Image: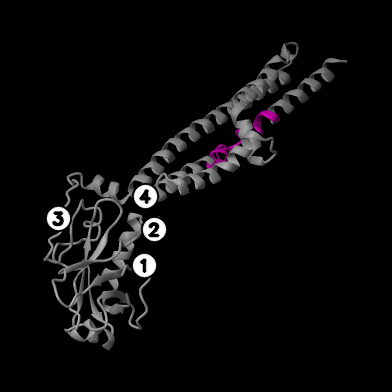
Amino acid sequence: MDEKARFQKIQSQLERYLYEYKNSFPKNIWQMIGVDLPFVILIVSLFVVVRLLGFGLMAIVLIALMLLPYILMWSTQTNSIWSKLWKKRKTYRADNQAIINKINEIDTSEFEQYPDVKRYLENFQSELAAETLRKESIAKSHKKIMIIGSLIILAGALLTFTTETRLKLFNPNIVDKQEKPKSDIIQNVFYDGQFYNTLKLTPKEPVAVVEPLNSTTKQMTDNHNKTLKIFFREFSGSAHYLRIKTPKISKYTWLRYEKFRLYITDTLGHPVKNIPYFEFKYVKHGTNPPIIESYPIATGLEKHPYEIIRRVKYLQDNAKILRYVIEGIEE
């Protein structure tokens, strides 16, 4: 085999290795991010589940279901694109170095005496070095993006998922201080400011002032045109309440009922969804409490700060189109 044929064979090898190197992992920044994205989504999802549900049985079941696909992928041989990229990601530095070693093992010294060949080899080495720098740049950019992304996710979690954390971050002087509700004075009750500040409450200004619905409500109460002033009570833990003055039940109604329920409704008398009702006893002889509180504003899976604020804010914003109804309860 003459020199020309031998060099053509070597050139073919070099070009094949260079093509393989250019198309090896990582080809671009999105290929690296694409490998990490399922893990980022998993971590964020796990955080949301724990923040919303706490670390109880329901949360553990959901976490197990979310982890199951990842466990199956790691424990079995799969041929999905993501699993292939994940395997390449683990070994890409060693794989790329193996290609470069193959290139360096090719002996071209006998052809360097020819100017055209020497120029070709210099251009080849420049192209190889440029591709190496490009891949290193991709790895560095990926590292920066992951660090910045992690900080953004962490900041978003602190400022979005936990209202209490957000308020205390911007209001570091807030301390947990339980204000004991006065038994005979109706007002908003402050605990730690978690909701008090967000809803812009003051002690004496009610959350909402609601008109009675119709004659049914008027017949139940002594004051036929009595408006209902609704206040809010912060409380330790996740339970928070609405407060009202105990309505004065008419003497006629005493003869039929001792227990009553007050609903917040729309103008047609339909109870407003997600607004708690008030249940109380009103006795003919004896002393009735001057103030009653509703059932908790949110319970179970819904007792998240955002949901509590949303419901109270709905009362604030829509008081003019809301009504209230009192019904007697058979016992």
In the image, 128 versus 219, the foreground residue is 219
Q: Which residue is mark 3?
A: 180
Say how the picture is coloured.
Answer: one colour
State whether residue 240 is above or below residue 224: above
Q: State how far apart marks 2 and 3 are (Cα).
A: 26 Å
Question: Quick one: label 4, few (<14), some, or many (20+) residues within 10 Å?
Answer: some
Residue visible at 24% across and 80% down in the picture: 211
Whether residue 6 is in magenta: the answer is no
Quarter occupied by residue 15 = top right
Whether residue 33 is in magenta: the answer is yes
**Foreground disc of the pair 1, 3:** 3
Q: Which residue is mark 4?
A: 161
Q: State how far apart marks 4 and 1 are (Cα).
A: 21 Å
CB under 8 Å between discs 1 and 3 = no
Mark positioned earlier in the residue sequence (2 or 1): 1
Q: Which mark is residue 302?
A: 2
Relative placement, left or right, of 90 versus 265 is right
In the image, 142 versus 2, the foreground residue is 142
Farthest residue in the bottom direction?
A: 215
Question: Quick one: label 3, few (<14), some, or many (20+) residues within 10 Å?
Answer: few
Residue visible at 29% across and 46% down in the picture: 165
Mark positioned earlier in the residue sequence (4 or 2): 4
Mark positioned earlier in the residue sequence (1 or 3): 3
Residue range corresponding to the magenta coloring: 20-38
Which kind of residue does numbered mark 4 sit on? Phe
The total number of labels drawn is 4
CB under 8 Å between discs 2 and 1 = yes
Quarter occupied by residue 4 = top right
Q: Which mark is residue 274?
A: 1
**Foreground disc of the pair 4, 1:** 1
Which kind of residue does numbered mark 2 sit on? Glu
